[in-house]
Image (cartoon, rainbow, N blue to C red):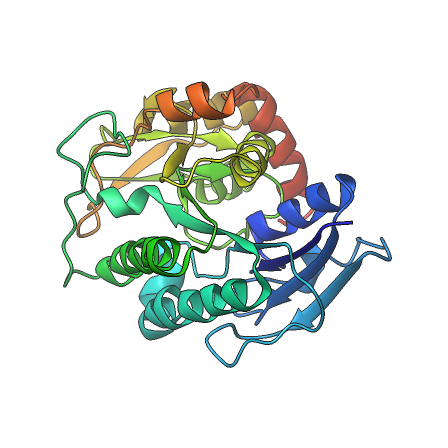
């Protein structure tokens, strides 16, 4: 039975990963300091192969017994979170990743780093391939997250090359689904919450900036395929179906049958104008691409948020 550690295991993505790993026969140890995660996301897991430890991975990291895989998903991930917690965001991307890699080295475990499309910054290349080095403002308000993840990638590859640690890096594009926090500030929960309450949907800028939305089940499937592959270079996992934020707002209004209108607010500093993954590498090396249609994924996500509004 593989023994797998998931940092950030009580978070949105981490909790879904824990479930899927258990279904695939792993023993799973979830670590989370609950700064943005919640035990509500994992309380329903009754599998005896699952355990939870409240733990900040920037502290000394010790796990008793053998470990085969580590999935490092601990980090604030929404602009509201990392703007409110700039220093913890930098620490978990740097010190936390260092501790995780040290554990992987000690246990001879394979480690998968959750990176992000934010390493591309406000991209000058479209769509974004893994070979693109990005356009990031290191001293802007979003730089604490962008640069933390860029450093995390750099130290992960250093452990791969210098210590021979088996590493995988996933660059995650916009993902949505049940267990997102209602007030986490990202566009999907913002729009759905506003639609369900009959409030105006807030679009920043003129709404012409683009995003590509991947349902969580598709993303988790891609991550686990990457974990079990021999690909040690970064890999984009996301949905290449690009749409403007204004189009997405109109879709939410349509799917929710709300009478809400759209209102416009100023665009935040360094907000990316375009986001679309090139998933050629994932298609060719992992035989992966997203399958869930937007209307189906939004319906499942809305059903979840109706229990939270």
Q: Which residue in the rendered view is the most extreme toward the bottom? A: 60
Residue 228: where, in percent of width, then height?
A: 58, 37
Q: 213 left or right of 5? A: left
Image point (36%, 46%), residue name? 116
Residue 237: where, in percent of width, then height?
A: 43, 33
Report the front residue among 12 and 243.
Answer: 12
Image point (16%, 50%), residue name? 136
* Visible residue check, residue 257: no
* Visible residue check, residue 283: yes
The answer to whether residue 143 is above or below residue 193 is below
Q: Which image quarter: residue 139?
A: bottom left
Q: 142 left or right of 188? A: left
Residue 256: where, in percent of width, then height?
A: 56, 27
Q: 21 left or right of 143? A: right
Residue 137: where, in percent of width, then height?
A: 14, 54
Numbered marks: total:
0
Q: Which image quarter: residue 61?
A: bottom right
Q: Which image quarter: residue 163?
A: bottom left
Report the front residue among 34 and 301.
Answer: 34
Image point (64%, 54%), residue name? 68
Q: 121 left or right of 41? A: left
């Amino acid at each position: 039975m593989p023994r797998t550690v998931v940092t950030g295991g009580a978070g949105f993505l981490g909790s879904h990963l824990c479930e899927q790993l258990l279904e695939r026969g792993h023993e799973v140890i979830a670590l989370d300091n609950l700064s943005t995660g919640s035990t509500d996301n994992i309380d329903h897991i009754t599998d005896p192969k699952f355990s939870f430890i409240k733990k900040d991975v920037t502290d000394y990291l010790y796990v008793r017994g053998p470990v085969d895989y580590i999935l490092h998903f601990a980090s604030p991930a929404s602009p509201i979170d990392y703007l409110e917690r700039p220093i913890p965001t930098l620490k978990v991307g740097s010190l936390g990743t260092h501790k995780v890699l040290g554990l992987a080295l000690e246990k001879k475990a394979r480690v998968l780093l959750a990176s992000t499309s934010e390493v591309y910054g406000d991209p000058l290349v479209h769509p974004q391939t893994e070979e693109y080095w990005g356009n990031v403002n290191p001293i802007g308000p979003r730089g604490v997250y962008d640069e933390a993840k860029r450093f995390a990638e750099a130290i992960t590859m250093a452990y791969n090359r210098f210590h021979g640690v088996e590493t995988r890096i996933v660059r995650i594009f916009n993902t949505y689904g049940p267990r997102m926090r209602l007030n986490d500030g990202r566009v999907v929960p913002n729009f759905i919450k506003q639609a369900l309450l009959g409030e105006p949907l807030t679009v920043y800028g003129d709404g012409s900036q683009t995003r590509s939305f991947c349902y969580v089940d598709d993303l988790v499937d891609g991550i686990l395929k990457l974990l079990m592959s021999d690909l040690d270079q970064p890999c984009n996992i996301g949905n290449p179906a690009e749409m403007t934020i204004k189009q997405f707002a109109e879709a939410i209004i349509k799917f929710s049958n709300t009478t809400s209108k759209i209102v416009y607010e100023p665009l935040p500093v360094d907000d990316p104008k375009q986001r679309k993954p090139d998933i050629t590498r994932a298609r060719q090396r992992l035989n992966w691409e997203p399958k869930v249609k937007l209307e189906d994924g939004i319906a499942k996500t809305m059903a979840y948020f109706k229990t939270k509004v």
